[in-house]
Image (cartoon, rainbow, N blue to C red):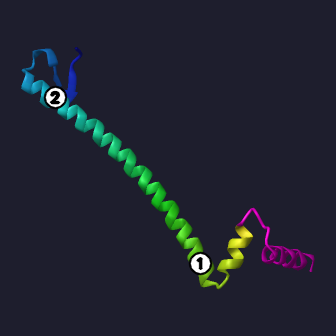
């Protein structure tokens, strides 16, 4: 079995007592868990940032009183008549 380094110190598992081997395995488990938790934290931070960005965009639109119109304009599926009217108004404004 290869040597294991923990906190800069090398341990040879073959020369350790059973109790020391258990502690070594626990330390390795904790190290892996810390790496996993850091990755989970990064994922959670990215998700939170995305949600906050969406919240800020919605709040800005709602503050301007255009929440429904903006939501319909942002939709790639403009199927209702209100969305068609918004599109027609935009087209007319661009022609002016």
Q: Please tell me whether mark 2 sits on a helix, a strand or a loop.
A: helix
Quadrant assignment for the N terminus: top left
Identify the residue at horizontal 15%, vertical 19% (top origin): 13
Main SS, magenta residues: helix
Q: Quadrant of residue 25?
A: top left
Where residue 43 appears, as percent x and y from the top left, is 44, 50
Q: In the image, is residue 3 above or below residue 86?
A: above
Q: Position of residue 28 (x, y in %)?
A: 23, 32
Query: Looking at the image, can residue 7 be seen?
Result: no
Q: Which residue is mark 1?
A: 60
The reply to whether residue 74 is visible in this rendering is yes
Q: CA distance from mark 2 to mark 1?
A: 54 Å
Q: Which numbered dot is residue 24?
A: 2
Residue 92 marker: none
Q: Residue furthest right?
A: 95
Image location (x, y in percent) of residue 64: 64, 84
Residue sitting at 83 percent across and 78 percent down?
85
Span of residues in magenta: 75-96
How packed is label 2: few (under 14 Cα within 10 Å), some, or many (20 or more)? some
Looking at the rendering, in which quadrant would you find the C terminus?
Answer: bottom right
Magenta span includes 41: no
Q: On the rendered structure, is 19 left or right of 52?
A: left
């Amino acid at each position: 079995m290869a040597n294991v380094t923990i906190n800069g110190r090398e341990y040879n598992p073959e020369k350790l007592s059973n109790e020391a081997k258990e502690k070594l395995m626990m330390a390795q488990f904790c190290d892996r868990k810390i790496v996993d938790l850091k990755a989970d934290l990064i994922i959670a931070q990215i998700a939170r940032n995305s949600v906050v960005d969406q919240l800020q965009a919605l709040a800005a639109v709602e503050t301007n009183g255009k929440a429904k119109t903006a939501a319909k304009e942002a939709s790639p599926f403009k199927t209702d008549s209100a969305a068609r009217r918004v599109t027609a108004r935009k087209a007319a404004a661009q022609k002016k």
